[in-house]
Amino acid sequence: MRNRWIWALTLTLSKYYQFHTTELPDTKHNVVFRDEGGEPLPQLVLLRNQARDFQIIRIQGASFVWGSTLTRDIRQLADQLPAFRKRLRARKLEVINLYVFPFEPVSSIQERLDEMQILEEDDRITMTSYPIFLNDLYVPYADQSEQVQEKETEEKEIQLAQLDWSRWDIDTSQVAAHMRKHFLHLTVEEMKHELRQEERKKEKQFASIFKFGRPILTYAFLVLNALVYFFLEYVGSSTDPETLITYGAKWNPSIVDGQYWRLLSAMFLHIGILHIIMNSIALYFLGSLVERIYGSLRFLWIYLFAGFAGTLASFAFVDNLAAGASGAIFGCFGALLYFGLKYRDLFFRTLGMDVLIILLINLGIGAVIPMIDNYGHVGGLLGGFSAAVMLSLPHKRAVLERVGATVVTVVLVVGLILFGFKQAGTSPYYFLHHAGLALERNDQAEARWFVAQARELAYDEPEFDIQLGMVYNQLQDYDEAVTLLEQAEQKGAQYEALFIEHGVALMGLERYDEARDQLTQVIRRSPHLEEPYLRLAFLLMQMSQWEEAAEVLDRAEERDIESERMAMLRDMIDRRTIGEYPEP
Protein backbone atom coordinates (compact mmCIF):
# COMPACT_ATOMS: atom_id res chain seq x y z
CA MET A 1 0.00 0.00 0.00
CA ARG A 2 2.86 2.39 0.84
CA ASN A 3 4.56 1.83 -2.51
CA ARG A 4 1.25 2.24 -4.31
CA TRP A 5 0.62 5.58 -2.58
CA ILE A 6 4.14 6.82 -3.36
CA TRP A 7 3.89 5.96 -7.05
CA ALA A 8 0.39 7.44 -7.29
CA LEU A 9 1.68 10.77 -5.93
CA THR A 10 4.78 10.68 -8.18
CA LEU A 11 2.72 10.00 -11.31
CA THR A 12 0.24 12.77 -10.42
CA LEU A 13 2.96 15.40 -9.87
CA SER A 14 4.77 14.43 -13.08
CA LYS A 15 1.64 14.28 -15.23
CA TYR A 16 -0.27 17.34 -14.05
CA TYR A 17 2.21 19.70 -12.33
CA GLN A 18 5.33 19.74 -14.59
CA PHE A 19 7.58 17.88 -12.15
CA HIS A 20 10.14 15.42 -13.44
CA THR A 21 12.07 12.77 -11.58
CA THR A 22 15.71 13.34 -10.70
CA GLU A 23 18.31 12.14 -8.23
CA LEU A 24 20.09 13.93 -5.43
CA PRO A 25 23.88 13.59 -5.08
CA ASP A 26 25.08 10.51 -3.16
CA THR A 27 21.55 9.15 -2.85
CA LYS A 28 22.74 5.58 -3.25
CA HIS A 29 25.28 5.95 -0.47
CA ASN A 30 23.00 7.53 2.14
CA VAL A 31 20.11 5.09 2.37
CA VAL A 32 18.89 4.84 5.96
CA PHE A 33 15.38 3.43 5.53
CA ARG A 34 15.08 -0.32 4.91
CA ASP A 35 12.33 -2.87 5.06
CA GLU A 36 12.28 -6.04 7.18
CA GLY A 37 14.39 -7.86 4.61
CA GLY A 38 17.11 -5.15 4.62
CA GLU A 39 16.21 -3.79 1.20
CA PRO A 40 16.11 0.00 0.70
CA LEU A 41 12.63 1.50 0.86
CA PRO A 42 11.56 3.56 -2.18
CA GLN A 43 12.80 7.13 -2.46
CA LEU A 44 11.67 9.40 -5.30
CA VAL A 45 12.80 12.96 -5.95
CA LEU A 46 10.74 15.31 -8.14
CA LEU A 47 11.96 18.64 -9.47
CA ARG A 48 10.51 21.63 -11.30
CA ASN A 49 11.41 25.29 -11.58
CA GLN A 50 9.89 28.72 -12.07
CA ALA A 51 12.73 30.69 -13.67
CA ARG A 52 15.62 30.43 -11.19
CA ASP A 53 13.46 29.30 -8.25
CA PHE A 54 13.54 25.51 -8.02
CA GLN A 55 11.17 23.25 -6.13
CA ILE A 56 11.85 19.71 -4.93
CA ILE A 57 9.49 17.15 -3.50
CA ARG A 58 11.30 14.23 -1.97
CA ILE A 59 9.13 11.20 -1.15
CA GLN A 60 10.77 8.71 1.19
CA GLY A 61 9.21 5.41 2.17
CA ALA A 62 9.58 4.77 5.91
CA SER A 63 8.79 2.08 8.45
CA PHE A 64 9.30 1.99 12.20
CA VAL A 65 12.09 4.47 12.97
CA TRP A 66 13.75 6.02 15.95
CA GLY A 67 13.88 9.78 16.24
CA SER A 68 17.65 9.68 15.74
CA THR A 69 17.14 7.93 12.38
CA LEU A 70 14.96 10.80 11.15
CA THR A 71 17.48 13.32 12.42
CA ARG A 72 20.32 11.58 10.56
CA ASP A 73 18.35 11.39 7.32
CA ILE A 74 17.33 15.06 7.43
CA ARG A 75 20.90 16.15 8.10
CA GLN A 76 22.20 14.02 5.25
CA LEU A 77 19.59 15.57 2.95
CA ALA A 78 20.47 19.07 4.20
CA ASP A 79 24.15 18.41 3.44
CA GLN A 80 23.32 17.44 -0.14
CA LEU A 81 21.14 20.45 -0.94
CA PRO A 82 23.76 23.28 -1.17
CA ALA A 83 25.76 21.38 -3.81
CA PHE A 84 22.55 20.50 -5.63
CA ARG A 85 21.46 24.15 -5.64
CA LYS A 86 24.80 25.20 -7.13
CA ARG A 87 24.56 22.49 -9.77
CA LEU A 88 21.14 23.81 -10.75
CA ARG A 89 22.39 27.42 -10.55
CA ALA A 90 19.22 28.08 -8.58
CA ARG A 91 18.59 31.41 -6.91
CA LYS A 92 16.34 29.69 -4.39
CA LEU A 93 15.66 26.05 -3.59
CA GLU A 94 12.50 25.00 -1.75
CA VAL A 95 12.22 21.42 -0.54
CA ILE A 96 9.22 19.47 0.71
CA ASN A 97 10.41 16.29 2.40
CA LEU A 98 7.71 13.62 2.82
CA TYR A 99 8.08 10.50 4.97
CA VAL A 100 5.44 7.92 4.10
CA PHE A 101 4.68 5.51 7.00
CA PRO A 102 2.34 2.50 6.69
CA PHE A 103 1.04 3.31 10.19
CA GLU A 104 1.51 5.98 12.85
CA PRO A 105 4.35 5.09 15.22
CA VAL A 106 3.92 5.40 18.96
CA SER A 107 6.64 8.05 19.25
CA SER A 108 5.85 11.58 18.13
CA ILE A 109 7.34 11.84 14.64
CA GLN A 110 5.87 15.30 14.01
CA GLU A 111 7.58 16.81 17.04
CA ARG A 112 10.92 15.49 15.85
CA LEU A 113 10.32 16.90 12.35
CA ASP A 114 9.26 20.29 13.75
CA GLU A 115 12.62 20.53 15.51
CA MET A 116 14.45 20.11 12.16
CA GLN A 117 12.63 22.60 9.91
CA ILE A 118 15.23 25.36 9.60
CA LEU A 119 18.50 25.05 7.66
CA GLU A 120 20.70 27.65 9.29
CA GLU A 121 23.64 27.23 6.86
CA ASP A 122 22.00 28.73 3.74
CA ASP A 123 19.04 31.12 3.65
CA ARG A 124 18.60 30.36 -0.08
CA ILE A 125 17.40 26.87 0.82
CA THR A 126 14.23 26.07 2.73
CA MET A 127 13.13 22.57 3.69
CA THR A 128 9.90 21.46 5.32
CA SER A 129 9.35 17.86 6.38
CA TYR A 130 5.99 16.13 6.79
CA PRO A 131 4.97 12.63 7.90
CA ILE A 132 2.25 10.76 5.97
CA PHE A 133 0.50 7.95 7.88
CA LEU A 134 -1.41 5.41 5.83
CA ASN A 135 -2.98 3.31 8.60
CA ASP A 136 -6.42 4.93 8.06
CA LEU A 137 -6.18 4.86 4.28
CA TYR A 138 -8.99 2.92 2.62
CA VAL A 139 -7.85 -0.07 0.55
CA PRO A 140 -10.50 -1.30 -1.89
CA TYR A 141 -11.38 -4.95 -2.18
CA ALA A 142 -11.36 -6.68 -5.51
CA ASP A 143 -15.03 -7.72 -5.35
CA GLN A 144 -16.32 -4.19 -4.73
CA SER A 145 -17.82 -2.23 -7.57
CA GLU A 146 -16.02 0.85 -8.93
CA GLN A 147 -18.76 3.13 -7.58
CA VAL A 148 -18.42 1.67 -4.08
CA GLN A 149 -14.63 1.93 -4.23
CA GLU A 150 -14.75 5.64 -5.20
CA LYS A 151 -17.38 6.42 -2.55
CA GLU A 152 -15.43 4.72 0.21
CA THR A 153 -12.15 6.29 -0.93
CA GLU A 154 -13.67 9.81 -0.90
CA GLU A 155 -14.77 9.24 2.71
CA LYS A 156 -11.22 8.17 3.60
CA GLU A 157 -9.06 11.11 2.50
CA ILE A 158 -5.95 10.30 0.48
CA GLN A 159 -3.81 11.75 3.31
CA LEU A 160 -2.79 15.15 1.87
CA ALA A 161 -5.11 17.42 3.81
CA GLN A 162 -2.42 18.58 6.25
CA LEU A 163 -0.09 19.70 3.43
CA ASP A 164 -0.17 23.32 2.28
CA TRP A 165 1.36 23.68 -1.20
CA SER A 166 -0.62 26.78 -2.16
CA ARG A 167 2.59 28.86 -2.47
CA TRP A 168 3.53 26.53 -5.33
CA ASP A 169 0.08 26.92 -6.92
CA ILE A 170 -0.71 23.31 -6.12
CA ASP A 171 -4.16 22.46 -4.76
CA THR A 172 -3.72 19.35 -2.63
CA SER A 173 -7.38 18.47 -2.99
CA GLN A 174 -6.89 18.22 -6.78
CA VAL A 175 -3.73 16.21 -6.24
CA ALA A 176 -5.70 13.85 -4.02
CA ALA A 177 -8.39 13.48 -6.68
CA HIS A 178 -5.84 12.51 -9.34
CA MET A 179 -4.07 10.19 -6.92
CA ARG A 180 -7.35 8.50 -6.06
CA LYS A 181 -7.89 7.52 -9.70
CA HIS A 182 -4.38 6.13 -10.04
CA PHE A 183 -4.61 4.39 -6.67
CA LEU A 184 -7.89 2.68 -7.53
CA HIS A 185 -7.32 1.68 -11.13
CA LEU A 186 -3.58 1.07 -11.57
CA THR A 187 -1.09 -1.34 -10.06
CA VAL A 188 2.38 -0.17 -9.02
CA GLU A 189 3.90 -1.60 -12.19
CA GLU A 190 1.25 0.11 -14.33
CA MET A 191 1.96 3.43 -12.61
CA LYS A 192 5.70 2.99 -13.19
CA HIS A 193 5.02 2.26 -16.86
CA GLU A 194 2.81 5.33 -17.23
CA LEU A 195 5.45 7.47 -15.48
CA ARG A 196 8.11 6.25 -17.92
CA GLN A 197 5.81 7.14 -20.80
CA GLU A 198 5.29 10.61 -19.30
CA GLU A 199 9.05 11.11 -18.97
CA ARG A 200 9.60 9.99 -22.59
CA LYS A 201 6.91 12.42 -23.70
CA LYS A 202 8.73 15.26 -21.94
CA GLU A 203 12.02 14.18 -23.51
CA LYS A 204 10.42 14.32 -26.96
CA GLN A 205 9.06 17.79 -26.21
CA PHE A 206 12.53 18.84 -25.06
CA ALA A 207 14.09 17.41 -28.23
CA SER A 208 11.50 19.13 -30.42
CA ILE A 209 12.60 22.46 -28.94
CA PHE A 210 16.37 21.99 -28.87
CA LYS A 211 16.73 19.82 -31.97
CA PHE A 212 14.41 21.56 -34.44
CA GLY A 213 17.27 22.20 -36.85
CA ARG A 214 20.83 21.12 -37.60
CA PRO A 215 23.81 23.53 -37.46
CA ILE A 216 24.52 23.42 -41.20
CA LEU A 217 24.77 27.18 -41.76
CA THR A 218 26.84 27.64 -38.59
CA TYR A 219 29.54 25.42 -40.07
CA ALA A 220 29.18 27.19 -43.44
CA PHE A 221 29.76 30.59 -41.81
CA LEU A 222 32.77 29.22 -39.92
CA VAL A 223 34.32 28.03 -43.18
CA LEU A 224 33.46 31.27 -44.99
CA ASN A 225 35.00 33.42 -42.24
CA ALA A 226 38.17 31.31 -42.31
CA LEU A 227 38.44 31.54 -46.11
CA VAL A 228 38.03 35.33 -46.03
CA TYR A 229 40.66 35.59 -43.29
CA PHE A 230 43.22 33.54 -45.26
CA PHE A 231 42.41 35.56 -48.39
CA LEU A 232 43.18 38.82 -46.53
CA GLU A 233 46.45 37.36 -45.28
CA TYR A 234 47.30 36.28 -48.83
CA VAL A 235 46.66 39.66 -50.47
CA GLY A 236 47.98 41.77 -47.60
CA SER A 237 47.35 41.54 -43.89
CA SER A 238 44.18 41.19 -41.86
CA THR A 239 45.58 43.81 -39.48
CA ASP A 240 46.43 46.30 -42.23
CA PRO A 241 43.83 49.11 -42.41
CA GLU A 242 44.31 49.57 -46.15
CA THR A 243 43.69 45.88 -46.83
CA LEU A 244 40.61 45.87 -44.60
CA ILE A 245 39.17 48.98 -46.26
CA THR A 246 39.84 47.61 -49.73
CA TYR A 247 37.98 44.37 -49.07
CA GLY A 248 34.91 45.56 -47.21
CA ALA A 249 35.50 46.58 -43.60
CA LYS A 250 33.19 49.12 -42.03
CA TRP A 251 34.70 52.46 -43.02
CA ASN A 252 32.31 55.34 -42.47
CA PRO A 253 33.57 57.71 -45.20
CA SER A 254 33.15 54.97 -47.83
CA ILE A 255 29.65 54.14 -46.60
CA VAL A 256 28.66 57.82 -46.76
CA ASP A 257 30.01 57.91 -50.33
CA GLY A 258 27.63 55.12 -51.35
CA GLN A 259 29.34 51.83 -50.48
CA TYR A 260 26.38 50.60 -48.44
CA TRP A 261 27.34 46.94 -48.94
CA ARG A 262 29.97 47.43 -46.22
CA LEU A 263 27.17 47.23 -43.64
CA LEU A 264 27.00 43.52 -44.48
CA SER A 265 30.48 42.67 -45.76
CA ALA A 266 32.24 43.86 -42.58
CA MET A 267 30.84 40.91 -40.60
CA PHE A 268 32.88 38.43 -42.65
CA LEU A 269 36.27 40.12 -42.10
CA HIS A 270 38.41 39.71 -38.98
CA ILE A 271 41.34 41.70 -37.66
CA GLY A 272 44.15 39.34 -36.71
CA ILE A 273 44.35 35.66 -35.80
CA LEU A 274 43.16 36.06 -32.20
CA HIS A 275 40.03 37.91 -33.35
CA ILE A 276 38.92 35.14 -35.71
CA ILE A 277 39.80 32.34 -33.27
CA MET A 278 37.72 33.86 -30.46
CA ASN A 279 34.79 34.64 -32.75
CA SER A 280 34.93 31.18 -34.32
CA ILE A 281 34.76 29.49 -30.91
CA ALA A 282 31.81 31.65 -29.90
CA LEU A 283 30.04 31.09 -33.23
CA TYR A 284 30.57 27.33 -33.01
CA PHE A 285 28.80 27.06 -29.65
CA LEU A 286 26.23 29.86 -29.84
CA GLY A 287 25.45 29.52 -33.53
CA SER A 288 24.96 25.77 -33.25
CA LEU A 289 22.58 26.21 -30.34
CA VAL A 290 20.55 28.97 -32.02
CA GLU A 291 20.33 27.07 -35.31
CA ARG A 292 19.16 23.93 -33.48
CA ILE A 293 16.43 25.91 -31.71
CA TYR A 294 15.27 28.14 -34.57
CA GLY A 295 16.13 26.09 -37.66
CA SER A 296 18.47 27.05 -40.50
CA LEU A 297 16.28 29.61 -42.30
CA ARG A 298 15.46 31.53 -39.12
CA PHE A 299 19.11 31.34 -38.07
CA LEU A 300 20.21 32.75 -41.43
CA TRP A 301 17.94 35.76 -40.92
CA ILE A 302 18.99 36.22 -37.27
CA TYR A 303 22.72 35.99 -38.05
CA LEU A 304 22.70 38.31 -41.06
CA PHE A 305 20.34 40.88 -39.57
CA ALA A 306 22.24 40.94 -36.27
CA GLY A 307 25.53 41.42 -38.15
CA PHE A 308 23.95 44.24 -40.16
CA ALA A 309 22.50 45.82 -36.99
CA GLY A 310 25.87 45.63 -35.22
CA THR A 311 27.67 47.29 -38.13
CA LEU A 312 24.93 49.91 -38.42
CA ALA A 313 25.21 50.79 -34.72
CA SER A 314 28.97 51.06 -35.09
CA PHE A 315 28.49 53.27 -38.18
CA ALA A 316 26.15 55.55 -36.23
CA PHE A 317 28.28 55.95 -33.10
CA VAL A 318 31.91 54.98 -33.87
CA ASP A 319 34.16 56.58 -36.50
CA ASN A 320 36.92 53.99 -36.39
CA LEU A 321 37.51 51.21 -38.89
CA ALA A 322 35.70 48.03 -37.76
CA ALA A 323 35.23 44.44 -38.88
CA GLY A 324 34.23 41.08 -37.47
CA ALA A 325 31.34 38.74 -36.74
CA SER A 326 30.96 39.96 -33.14
CA GLY A 327 27.67 41.74 -33.88
CA ALA A 328 26.21 38.58 -35.43
CA ILE A 329 27.45 36.50 -32.49
CA PHE A 330 25.87 38.88 -30.00
CA GLY A 331 22.75 38.52 -32.12
CA CYS A 332 22.79 34.83 -31.16
CA PHE A 333 22.73 35.96 -27.53
CA GLY A 334 19.73 38.13 -28.36
CA ALA A 335 17.91 35.21 -29.99
CA LEU A 336 18.56 33.07 -26.90
CA LEU A 337 17.18 35.82 -24.66
CA TYR A 338 13.98 35.83 -26.70
CA PHE A 339 13.84 32.05 -26.34
CA GLY A 340 14.23 32.59 -22.58
CA LEU A 341 11.21 34.87 -22.54
CA LYS A 342 9.08 32.27 -24.30
CA TYR A 343 10.38 29.24 -22.39
CA ARG A 344 11.40 30.90 -19.14
CA ASP A 345 11.45 27.85 -16.90
CA LEU A 346 13.16 25.62 -19.45
CA PHE A 347 15.70 28.38 -20.21
CA PHE A 348 16.83 28.66 -16.59
CA ARG A 349 16.74 24.89 -16.07
CA THR A 350 19.11 24.29 -18.98
CA LEU A 351 21.28 27.13 -20.29
CA GLY A 352 19.97 30.40 -18.87
CA MET A 353 22.62 31.29 -16.30
CA ASP A 354 25.50 30.28 -18.61
CA VAL A 355 24.12 32.52 -21.36
CA LEU A 356 23.57 35.49 -19.03
CA ILE A 357 26.98 35.20 -17.35
CA ILE A 358 28.89 34.96 -20.66
CA LEU A 359 26.86 37.84 -22.10
CA LEU A 360 27.54 40.11 -19.12
CA ILE A 361 31.25 39.24 -19.13
CA ASN A 362 31.57 40.10 -22.82
CA LEU A 363 29.66 43.36 -22.46
CA GLY A 364 31.81 44.22 -19.45
CA ILE A 365 35.02 43.54 -21.36
CA GLY A 366 33.76 45.70 -24.21
CA ALA A 367 33.00 48.55 -21.81
CA VAL A 368 36.46 48.41 -20.20
CA ILE A 369 38.76 47.87 -23.20
CA PRO A 370 38.76 50.95 -25.49
CA MET A 371 39.68 49.07 -28.70
CA ILE A 372 36.52 46.93 -28.56
CA ASP A 373 33.50 48.32 -30.42
CA ASN A 374 30.80 47.82 -27.79
CA TYR A 375 28.25 49.75 -29.87
CA GLY A 376 28.57 46.99 -32.47
CA HIS A 377 28.07 44.36 -29.77
CA VAL A 378 24.97 46.02 -28.32
CA GLY A 379 23.58 46.69 -31.80
CA GLY A 380 24.05 43.03 -32.69
CA LEU A 381 22.43 41.93 -29.43
CA LEU A 382 19.33 44.05 -30.04
CA GLY A 383 19.32 43.11 -33.72
CA GLY A 384 19.37 39.40 -32.94
CA PHE A 385 16.58 39.81 -30.40
CA SER A 386 14.38 41.78 -32.81
CA ALA A 387 15.13 39.37 -35.68
CA ALA A 388 14.02 36.48 -33.48
CA VAL A 389 10.82 38.31 -32.49
CA MET A 390 10.04 39.14 -36.13
CA LEU A 391 10.11 35.45 -37.08
CA SER A 392 9.18 34.00 -33.67
CA LEU A 393 10.06 30.47 -32.59
CA PRO A 394 9.10 27.33 -34.50
CA HIS A 395 5.47 26.32 -33.91
CA LYS A 396 4.68 29.80 -32.51
CA ARG A 397 2.54 32.23 -34.50
CA ALA A 398 2.49 35.41 -32.35
CA VAL A 399 1.28 37.50 -35.30
CA LEU A 400 0.71 40.78 -33.44
CA GLU A 401 4.04 40.48 -31.66
CA ARG A 402 5.84 39.91 -34.93
CA VAL A 403 4.14 42.80 -36.71
CA GLY A 404 4.85 45.15 -33.81
CA ALA A 405 8.51 44.10 -33.68
CA THR A 406 8.85 44.63 -37.44
CA VAL A 407 7.44 48.15 -37.26
CA VAL A 408 9.66 49.13 -34.32
CA THR A 409 12.73 47.62 -35.97
CA VAL A 410 12.16 49.45 -39.26
CA VAL A 411 11.80 52.76 -37.41
CA LEU A 412 15.01 52.16 -35.43
CA VAL A 413 16.99 51.11 -38.51
CA VAL A 414 15.89 54.17 -40.47
CA GLY A 415 16.69 56.39 -37.49
CA LEU A 416 20.17 54.89 -37.11
CA ILE A 417 20.88 55.28 -40.82
CA LEU A 418 19.90 58.98 -40.79
CA PHE A 419 21.83 59.63 -37.58
CA GLY A 420 24.85 57.73 -38.87
CA PHE A 421 25.01 59.68 -42.12
CA LYS A 422 24.78 62.94 -40.19
CA GLN A 423 27.56 61.94 -37.78
CA ALA A 424 29.87 60.37 -40.38
CA GLY A 425 29.50 63.33 -42.74
CA THR A 426 31.02 65.65 -40.11
CA SER A 427 33.75 63.27 -38.91
CA PRO A 428 37.46 64.14 -39.31
CA TYR A 429 37.94 60.75 -40.97
CA TYR A 430 35.47 61.80 -43.64
CA PHE A 431 37.55 64.89 -44.46
CA LEU A 432 40.78 62.87 -44.47
CA HIS A 433 39.18 60.38 -46.84
CA HIS A 434 38.27 63.17 -49.24
CA ALA A 435 41.73 64.68 -48.89
CA GLY A 436 43.09 61.37 -50.21
CA LEU A 437 40.61 61.42 -53.10
CA ALA A 438 41.68 65.00 -53.94
CA LEU A 439 45.33 63.90 -54.01
CA GLU A 440 44.42 61.11 -56.46
CA ARG A 441 43.16 63.92 -58.72
CA ASN A 442 46.42 65.85 -58.07
CA ASP A 443 44.41 68.66 -56.49
CA GLN A 444 46.69 69.63 -53.61
CA ALA A 445 44.80 72.81 -52.78
CA GLU A 446 41.57 70.92 -52.21
CA ALA A 447 43.45 68.22 -50.29
CA ARG A 448 44.97 70.79 -47.93
CA TRP A 449 41.51 72.32 -47.34
CA PHE A 450 40.16 68.91 -46.33
CA VAL A 451 43.19 68.33 -44.09
CA ALA A 452 42.58 71.67 -42.37
CA GLN A 453 38.95 70.70 -41.73
CA ALA A 454 40.04 67.33 -40.36
CA ARG A 455 42.55 68.89 -37.96
CA GLU A 456 39.91 71.19 -36.57
CA LEU A 457 37.86 68.10 -35.61
CA ALA A 458 40.87 65.96 -34.73
CA TYR A 459 40.56 62.95 -32.43
CA ASP A 460 43.21 62.17 -29.85
CA GLU A 461 43.70 58.59 -31.01
CA PRO A 462 46.56 56.84 -32.87
CA GLU A 463 44.39 55.69 -35.79
CA PHE A 464 43.61 59.31 -36.67
CA ASP A 465 47.28 60.28 -36.39
CA ILE A 466 48.20 57.49 -38.84
CA GLN A 467 45.55 58.52 -41.37
CA LEU A 468 46.63 62.15 -41.15
CA GLY A 469 50.30 61.17 -41.44
CA MET A 470 49.56 59.22 -44.62
CA VAL A 471 47.94 62.28 -46.18
CA TYR A 472 50.89 64.50 -45.22
CA ASN A 473 53.25 61.98 -46.89
CA GLN A 474 51.23 62.33 -50.07
CA LEU A 475 51.47 66.11 -49.71
CA GLN A 476 55.27 65.65 -49.24
CA ASP A 477 55.05 67.45 -45.91
CA TYR A 478 57.37 64.89 -44.31
CA ASP A 479 58.21 66.78 -41.13
CA GLU A 480 54.54 66.94 -40.15
CA ALA A 481 54.08 63.29 -41.15
CA VAL A 482 56.97 62.10 -38.94
CA THR A 483 55.63 64.07 -35.99
CA LEU A 484 52.17 62.53 -36.30
CA LEU A 485 53.41 58.97 -36.90
CA GLU A 486 55.82 59.08 -33.96
CA GLN A 487 52.94 60.40 -31.89
CA ALA A 488 50.87 57.37 -32.92
CA GLU A 489 53.70 55.01 -31.90
CA GLN A 490 53.93 56.68 -28.50
CA LYS A 491 50.19 56.01 -28.05
CA GLY A 492 50.85 52.30 -28.51
CA ALA A 493 49.84 51.75 -32.15
CA GLN A 494 51.47 48.71 -33.78
CA TYR A 495 50.02 48.69 -37.30
CA GLU A 496 52.04 47.72 -40.38
CA ALA A 497 50.68 50.82 -42.15
CA LEU A 498 52.14 52.98 -39.39
CA PHE A 499 55.69 51.62 -39.81
CA ILE A 500 55.52 51.74 -43.61
CA GLU A 501 54.32 55.36 -43.66
CA HIS A 502 56.91 56.26 -41.03
CA GLY A 503 59.59 54.76 -43.27
CA VAL A 504 58.29 56.71 -46.26
CA ALA A 505 58.35 59.97 -44.29
CA LEU A 506 61.93 59.32 -43.11
CA MET A 507 62.95 58.59 -46.71
CA GLY A 508 61.46 61.95 -47.74
CA LEU A 509 63.64 63.63 -45.09
CA GLU A 510 66.68 61.65 -46.36
CA ARG A 511 67.04 59.92 -42.98
CA TYR A 512 67.81 56.70 -44.82
CA ASP A 513 69.21 54.56 -42.02
CA GLU A 514 66.16 55.19 -39.83
CA ALA A 515 63.84 54.53 -42.76
CA ARG A 516 65.67 51.27 -43.44
CA ASP A 517 65.17 50.16 -39.83
CA GLN A 518 61.44 50.94 -39.99
CA LEU A 519 60.87 49.01 -43.21
CA THR A 520 62.99 46.05 -42.06
CA GLN A 521 60.89 45.90 -38.92
CA VAL A 522 57.69 45.65 -41.00
CA ILE A 523 59.15 42.80 -43.07
CA ARG A 524 60.06 40.90 -39.90
CA ARG A 525 56.54 41.41 -38.54
CA SER A 526 54.65 40.67 -41.76
CA PRO A 527 56.93 38.93 -44.28
CA HIS A 528 54.04 38.29 -46.68
CA LEU A 529 53.30 42.00 -47.35
CA GLU A 530 54.44 43.43 -50.70
CA GLU A 531 54.64 47.12 -49.78
CA PRO A 532 57.60 47.03 -47.33
CA TYR A 533 59.74 45.03 -49.82
CA LEU A 534 58.99 47.60 -52.53
CA ARG A 535 59.75 50.55 -50.25
CA LEU A 536 62.95 49.00 -48.88
CA ALA A 537 64.23 48.00 -52.33
CA PHE A 538 63.59 51.51 -53.64
CA LEU A 539 65.29 53.02 -50.56
CA LEU A 540 68.39 50.88 -51.13
CA MET A 541 68.41 51.96 -54.76
CA GLN A 542 68.29 55.58 -53.51
CA MET A 543 71.33 54.76 -51.39
CA SER A 544 73.06 53.18 -54.44
CA GLN A 545 73.06 49.77 -52.74
CA TRP A 546 71.88 47.90 -55.81
CA GLU A 547 72.95 44.41 -54.80
CA GLU A 548 71.15 44.68 -51.48
CA ALA A 549 68.05 45.98 -53.28
CA ALA A 550 68.18 42.91 -55.54
CA GLU A 551 68.45 40.67 -52.47
CA VAL A 552 65.30 42.29 -51.02
CA LEU A 553 63.39 41.52 -54.22
CA ASP A 554 64.75 37.96 -54.17
CA ARG A 555 63.39 37.49 -50.63
CA ALA A 556 60.01 38.75 -51.83
CA GLU A 557 60.01 36.32 -54.77
CA GLU A 558 60.82 33.45 -52.37
CA ARG A 559 57.50 34.23 -50.68
CA ASP A 560 55.68 34.26 -54.04
CA ILE A 561 55.20 38.03 -53.91
CA GLU A 562 54.96 39.26 -57.50
CA SER A 563 53.48 42.38 -59.09
CA GLU A 564 54.02 44.87 -61.88
CA ARG A 565 55.77 47.25 -59.49
CA MET A 566 58.13 44.47 -58.34
CA ALA A 567 58.89 43.64 -61.97
CA MET A 568 59.56 47.32 -62.71
CA LEU A 569 62.10 47.60 -59.88
CA ARG A 570 63.73 44.32 -60.95
CA ASP A 571 64.04 45.70 -64.50
CA MET A 572 65.63 48.91 -63.20
CA ILE A 573 68.19 46.90 -61.22
CA ASP A 574 68.99 44.64 -64.18
CA ARG A 575 69.47 47.66 -66.46
CA ARG A 576 71.72 49.25 -63.85
CA THR A 577 74.01 46.23 -63.83
CA ILE A 578 74.67 46.67 -67.58
CA GLY A 579 75.03 50.45 -67.33
CA GLU A 580 71.71 51.43 -68.91
CA TYR A 581 70.21 53.00 -65.80
CA PRO A 582 71.80 56.05 -64.14
CA GLU A 583 72.21 56.64 -60.42
CA PRO A 584 68.86 57.75 -58.87
Image: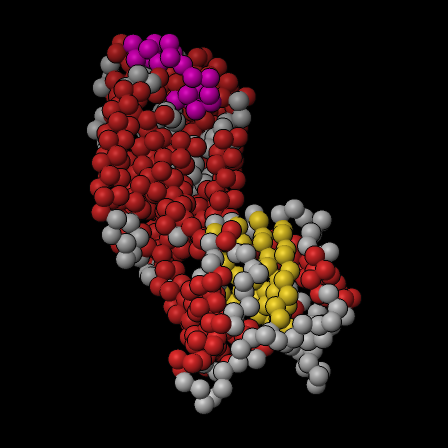
Q: On the picture, is 51 further left or further right than 227?
A: right
Residue 562 visible, this orientation? no
Residue 399 visible, this orientation? yes
Find the residue positioned furthest to the bottom: 143
Q: On the picture, is 220 further left or further right than 66?
A: left
Q: In the rendered view of the protein, which quadrant contains the N terminus?
A: bottom right
Q: Residue at x 46, y 17 (%)?
A: 460
Instruction: Please say if 291 is above or below 254.
Output: below
Task: Tell me where residue 444 sits by quadrant.
Answer: top left
Q: Residue at x 49, y 86 (%)?
A: 141
Q: Position of residue 512 (x, y in %)?
A: 49, 22
Colouring style: secondary structure
Q: Let me know if residue 473 is in the magenta part.
A: no
Q: Residue at x 73, y 61 (%)?
A: 112
Q: Position of residue 161 (x, y in %)?
A: 54, 62
Q: Position of residue 167 (x, y in %)?
A: 51, 51
Q: Position of residue 22 (x, y in %)?
A: 55, 66
Instruction: Please say if 320 is above or below 118.
Output: above
Closer to the camera in the image, 73 or 166: 166
**Which residues fall within the magenta stretch?**
448-467
Task: Tell me where residue 400 sits by quadrant.
Answer: top left
Count of numbered circles in the view:
0
Closer to the camera in the image, 365 or 389: 389
Instruction: Please say if 425 is above or below 162.
Output: above
Dominant SS of magenta comes to helix
Q: Residue at x 26, y 11 (%)?
A: 446
Closer to the camera in the image, 118 or 270: 118
Q: In the rendered view of the protein, which quadrant contains the C terminus?
A: top left
